[in-house]
């Protein structure tokens, strides 16, 4: 009786070991796909005709880099005109001189009135001219401030004619060329992909649910034509299991600062130091 009990226990341990090894092997053999972290279709904020497109398919781009520009002769002229108005202090200088002249005249009359060498009427008129000159000076200063705001607005309107990259990435498709009309409600100009950080998409069997945790590291091995072994980190573990297939999704982040790893290729993934939950 005791011997049968020992055999039963050994049998259970053997089955558990086989199941565990099977699960570990499953972890080592999971297929995956390497994809861009994100893609973005770049269009224009306004309508117009493209003057130039400065990049082509396959080019690397940086965030903020000028990709294309619409024809903008009118907008550039408006900026120059607004800049001349904003930079000019001529009107302020004229009003300042007029105010100072009236102030000196008023001061002289203030002294003369003490000796009755002038009339109260002349002094009142001088004071009125001084006040008017002061208001005109303030008006000139306000007008220059408005001219500076108008310059800023003109620059913003001109900037709308430029198309810049919103991300660090590569150009994956070019839709339009110089001379073509751009409508921001229609087809974009370029399609970009962010590939300095890649997504590794994994579909795992339900038997591994609970074993893979966010932050866990894994070895990613692209297909043989690419080769190499890279370290990625689990970013998302799908909390919902697909009942039809008995699987759930896992997303890892794979650094790719030098763009060495191409997106869109198959791979295999092996999780490091993973402990299965019974």
Image (cartoon, helix red, strand yellow):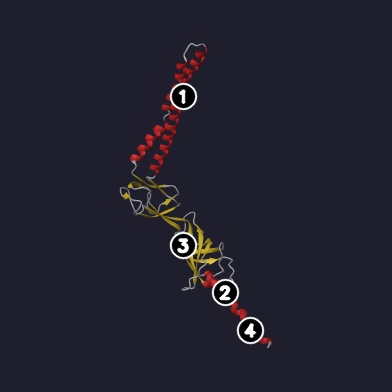
Q: Which residue is mark 1?
A: 131
C-alpha gap between disc 1 and disc 2:
95 Å
Helix, strand or loop at mark 1: helix
| Quarter-of-image position of residue 129 | top left
Q: Which residue is mark 3?
A: 34
C-alpha gap between disc 3 and disc 2:
27 Å
C-alpha gap between disc 4 and disc 2:
20 Å
Residue 68 spot, x, y in % from top left: 37, 47
Q: Are marks 1 and 3 in contact (CB under 8 Å)?
A: no
Left or right relative to 19: residue 136: left
Q: Nearer the viewer, mark 4 or mark 1?
A: 1
Q: Which residue is mark 4?
A: 8
| Quarter-of-image position of residue 14 | bottom right
Of residue 111 and residue 93, the one placed in the foreground of this image is 111
Q: Residue at x 48, y 18 (%)?
A: 106
Of residue 186 and residue 249, the one placed in the foreground of this image is 186
Quadrant of the image containing the C terminus: bottom right
Which is nearer the N-term, disc 4 or disc 1?
Answer: 4
Q: Which residue is mark 2?
A: 21
Residue 179 position (above or below residue 219): above
């Amino acid at each position: 009786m005791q011997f049968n009990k020992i055999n039963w226990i050994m049998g259970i341990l053997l089955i558990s070991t086989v199941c565990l090894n099977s699960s570990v092997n499953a972890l080592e053999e999971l297929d995956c796909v390497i994809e861009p972290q994100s893609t973005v279709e770049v269009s224009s904020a306004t309508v117009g005709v493209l003057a130039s497109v400065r990049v082509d398919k396959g080019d690397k781009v940086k965030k903020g880099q000028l990709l294309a520009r619409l024809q903008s002769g009118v907008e550039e002229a408006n900026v120059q005109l607004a800049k001349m108005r904003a930079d000019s202090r001529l009107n302020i200088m004229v009003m300042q001189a007029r105010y100072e002249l009236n102030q000196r005249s008023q001061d002289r009359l203030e002294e003369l009135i003490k000796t009755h060498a002038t009339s109260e009427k002349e002094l009142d008129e001088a004071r009125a001219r001084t006040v008017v000159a002061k208001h005109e000076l303030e008006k000139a200063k306000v007008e220059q401030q408005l001219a500076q705001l108008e310059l800023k607005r003109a620059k913003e309107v001109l900037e709308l004619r430029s198309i810049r990259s919103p991300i660090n990435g590569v150009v994956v498709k070019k839709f339009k060329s110089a001379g073509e009309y751009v409508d921001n409600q229609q087809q974009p100009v370029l399609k970009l992909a962010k590939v300095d950080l890649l997504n590794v998409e994994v579909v795992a069997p339900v038997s591994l649910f609970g074993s893979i945790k966010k932050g866990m590291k894994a070895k990613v091995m692209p297909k043989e034509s690419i080769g190499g072994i890279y370290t990625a980190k689990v970013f998302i573990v799908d909390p919902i299991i697909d009942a039809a297939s008995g699987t759930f999704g896992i997303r890892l982040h794979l650094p790719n600062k030098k763009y060495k790893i191409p997106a869109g290729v198959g791979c295999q993934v092996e999780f490091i130091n993973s402990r299965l939950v019974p």
